[in-house]
Amino acid sequence: MAANYPDLLELIPTIIWNSSVPLDVSTFPRSKIQLPANIDLMGHHFFFDSTTPEFNFNLDSSKQFGIAMTKKGGSIDAPANAVKGQYGAVPWLYLTTTKGTVGKYKAVYRVDTASGNPPDTCEGQPEKFQMRYSANYYFFGN
């Protein structure tokens, strides 16, 4: 799709954010999450610790595509026309890889963000809550 319709790529986060995708994917088999376009799951994104975003593409023994351990290299605010959701769109990021990366990953860009900013305060929020967002992530290596 990226090669044939590059202009559509920036629309994907808005389409996904406006679609009904389950927030708690922990109850689904790791490689069988059915997204709106029936796209195969590529990997998982979470935080290894409070400062280390991790992108794990090793889904099972037949899908070993590496792990990108990253740190923030820079950021800019999402454009004014980004989908804001309730509290605004999260910034666009430039991440660089760090020790622990498996594979040839060197940098990650998060762009085209839709929503995701947390409230200014947790007052009135439940003890645990999630902030829904969508974005395009681009991975670069050598």
Image (tube, rainbow, N blue to C red):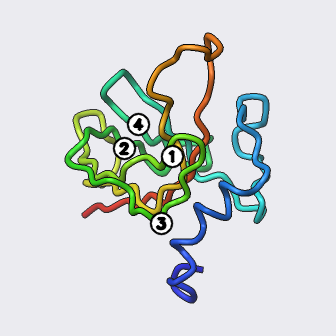
Task: State the SS at label 2.
Answer: strand
Report the quarter where the C terminus lies: bottom left
Residue drawn 58% across and 34% down?
A: 131
Numbered marks: total: 4
Residue 124 image position (x, y, % from top left): 61, 14
Q: Which residue is mark 4?
A: 54
> Is residue 93 placed above or below 30 in the rendered structure?
below
Q: Is residue 134 above or below residue 87?
A: below
Q: What secondary structure is marked by label 1? A: strand
Nearer the observer, 84 or 16: 84
Residue that badge 1 annotates: 57
Are the two marked residues, 3 and 2, in contact with CB atoms closer than 8 angstroms? no
- The secondary structure type at the circle numbered 3 is loop
Q: Earlier in the sequence, mark 1 or mark 3?
A: 1
Q: Earlier in the sequence, mark 4 or mark 2?
A: 4
- C-alpha gap between disc 1 and disc 2: 8 Å
Residue to which mark 2 is pinned: 68
Q: Amino acid at mark 4?
A: Glu
On screen, residue 9 versus residue 109, left or right, reads: right
Instruction: Indicate which disc residue 118 carries.
Output: none
Residue at the disc numbered 3: 81
> Nearer the viewer's eye, disc 3 or disc 2?
3
Mark before the other along the chain sequence, 3 or 2: 2
Disc 4 and disc 3 in contact, CB within 8 angstroms:
no
Residue at 55% across, 58% down: 83
**Place of residue 16 in the rendered image (x, y in percent of width and height, measured from the top left):** 67, 58
